[in-house]
Amino acid sequence: MRGPEIGHAAEGHSAAPVWEPMMEGAGTTSRASAVMLPGRILLPQGEECTCRFLSSGDDDLRAVIERDVAVGSRVVCHVDGLGVVDATVNRVSSDGLRLSLQGSPNRKARLAMRLAWHRARLNGQADRRGADRVTPLDPVVEVALADGTNVSARIADLSATGAALEMAVPPPMGAPLTVGRRRAHVVRRTDAGVAIRFVLSLRPEDVTADIRL
């Protein structure tokens, strides 16, 4: 399956975003960590505004903005580190708009995973995420070889920088290939196939079990 990837405007991102998430109420004794992410929101009347987004839970998203928006209105949010998020306004208060996330269950799950990653990073629990490896829930992937041949492979594990592929006929060292939609090259032979390195690294928050290359 190759559903739309959240937040990918291009093939990949080789560096982390230039912004840093912040904790709402930093410097206080509050234990609640609300991630603050910059972005933009497209309002129903067509106005696009720069704003901040706050999240303290997997399905919690608030837009900090002073605008008169009716409850039930649909908005489109462009959130740094999350991507494009469709939402409905379910409450308007002095601190902005509380949003209800829209989309398929899979899309909502991916958003929840990204929000959880940002909170873990905020709390110092995700410093090594770029080196962590996961096994995708759907490990089967199509690989395009340098000669134009397409073969099937299985992703044994995957990190932000590369993956281990199980292949019946492994390509040679240094061979270029495209795994799903991501370009890579072979860096090592393994007992079951090859280890590859991506030309453009994945964003660390995208390295989750439900990833689709």
Image (tube, helix red, strand yellow):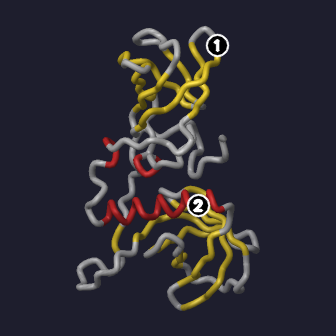
- Image quarter in which the C terminus is found: top right
Q: What element does badge 2 sit on?
A: strand
Q: Looking at the image, which is closer to me, 12 or 191?
A: 191
Q: What's the mark number on residue 120? A: none
For image coordinates 55% across by 79% down, the residue present is: 65
Q: Nearer the viewer, mark 2 or mark 1?
A: 1
Q: Amino acid at mark 1?
A: Thr
For image coordinates 39% across by 52% down, the residue present is: 18
Q: Looking at the image, which is closer to me, 167 or 12?
A: 167
Confirm whether residue 52 shows in the render: no
Can you identify the residue that label 2 sits on?
A: 78
- Residue 197, quarter of the rendered image: top left
Q: CA distance from mark 2 to mark 1?
A: 38 Å
* Total marks placed: 2
Mark earlier in primary sequence (2, 1): 2
- How crowded pointer 2 is (Cα within 10 Å; few <14, some 14-19, many 20+) is rated as some
Q: What's the mark number on residue 149? A: 1
Q: Amino acid at mark 2?
A: His
For image coordinates 37% across by 66% down, the residue present is: 119
| Location of residue 34 with respect to 202 vertically, above or below | below
Q: Where's residue 188, x and y in %?
A: 35, 17
- Image quarter in which the N terminus is found: top right
| Location of residue 105 with respect to 31 vertically, above or below | above
| Location of residue 47 with respect to 113 vertically, above or below | below
Q: Where's residue 46, x and y in %?
A: 74, 69
Q: Where's residue 158, x and y in %?
A: 42, 37
Q: Where's residue 44, x and y in %?
A: 74, 73
For image coordinates 64% across by 13% down, the residue present is: 149
Answer left or right for 139 relative to 164: right
- Residue 118, quarter of the rendered image: bottom left
